[in-house]
Amino acid sequence: MTTTLAAPDARAAAVLRRMEIDVTRRLDGLLHGDHRGLVPGRGSEPGESRPYVHGDDVRQIDWNVTARTGATHIRESIADRELETWLIVDRSPSLEFGTADSTKATLALSACAAVGFLTTHGGNRLGAIVAGRDGVTTVPARQGRRHTLGVLSRVASSSDSDGAVTVTFGEALRRAGGIVRRRGLIVVVSDFLDPIESWSKALGALGARHEVLAIECSDPREFELPAAGIVGLVDTETGRIVEINTSRASVRQGFAAAGVARRAAVHAAILGSGADHLGLSTDRDWLADVAGHVTRRKRRRANATTVGAKR
């Protein structure tokens, strides 16, 4: 479903304006002159060919030149003058959970705001594919601050519908493969609680063509439980309720171990797909985490350039 954006109401507009001010003040300077600073990579438009050296991305191999010369070559890429960014946002009921400073849904909106306000400059375009209770909504990529605010308002309101989820997060990723034709930046925002096998292949297919940043939203209670006696845990996706005795140390330890294992598996699946991974939590400063990611990415890129020059 493709939607026509309406202007955010007064309350939503005020929230988004505060986010815009925070992002601009604390993050915009980090990306000055580098609109691809959120993710690793050089660009997407084809440039000159050169001989392959150890450490180059094998996905950049130019097979035509390699066949003609008999030696492996890669095709350098140059940065786009205009960047097309797509948000793929999971707004399933599990994101309504939160026990710290916010819900994961608010954290997801904050992440989308950071990406939107940082990338939509100089004619860059922003589009969105939002998977919620009312199915999948596609917002075509367009320019302008007003459009960006409309996209963020749509993300914020996408959980208002009642009823069960009709389209899974993995299906939304697969749809994106057919919708996003132009090479660019894809930012996937989710808690990644769906079975890994349901989304990892689709994420890898996107990573083979685009630069992909996967932002994982989490809450501390997903990794540890307090000793609070018998509590009922509700699966927000299915409504199922399970009672457990949190006073038992073995239960808390088992829950914590399962949480750590799950996070490690998600991290491995994301990196295995070729995407970059940024973790945000409801008990941390999301702006500081985004800033740290951008800084580390710039440092890695600078180091890679230095190593390449020495060769």
Image: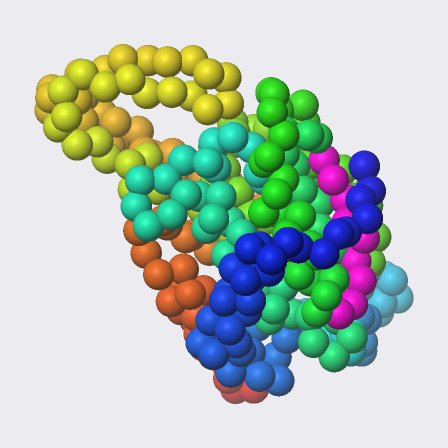
The percent position of residue 279, horizontal first and vertical second, equals 42, 52
Query: Which of 57/53 is in front?
Result: 57
**Of helix, strand and loop, which mostly describes the magenta segment?**
strand
What is the basis of the colouring in this image? Answer: rainbow
**Residue that lies at the very extreme toward the front in this rendered image:** 10
Q: Is residue 169 magenta?
A: no
On the image, the x and y values in percent for residue 2 come to 82, 42
Quarter of the figure that contains the N terminus:
top right
Query: Viewed as shown, does residue 143 lie left or right of 109?
Result: right
Count of picture labels: 0
Look at 31% across and 40% down and name the residue there. 99
Q: Residue at left 87%, top 62%? A: 64
> Against 107, is 143 above or below?
below
Residue shown at 42% from the left, 65% from the top: 287
Residue in the foreground of this view, choosing between 64 and 157 = 157
Look at 67% across and 23% down and name the residue there: 166
178 lies above or below 306: above
- Identify which residue, 274 or 277, lies in the foreground: 277
Task: Answer yes or no: is residue 9 visible.
Answer: yes
* Residue 143 belongs to the span the image colors magenta: yes
In this picture, which residue range is highlighted in magenta? 136-144
- Which quadrant does the C terminus fall into? bottom right
Query: Where residue 237 sits: x, y (%)?
Result: 50, 23
Between 270 and 101, the one nearer to me in the picture: 101
Looking at the image, residue 113 lies above or below residue 301: above
Residue 10: give x, y in percent of width and height: 60, 57
Q: Is residue 85 visible?
A: no
Name which quarter of the figure residue 77 lies in: bottom right
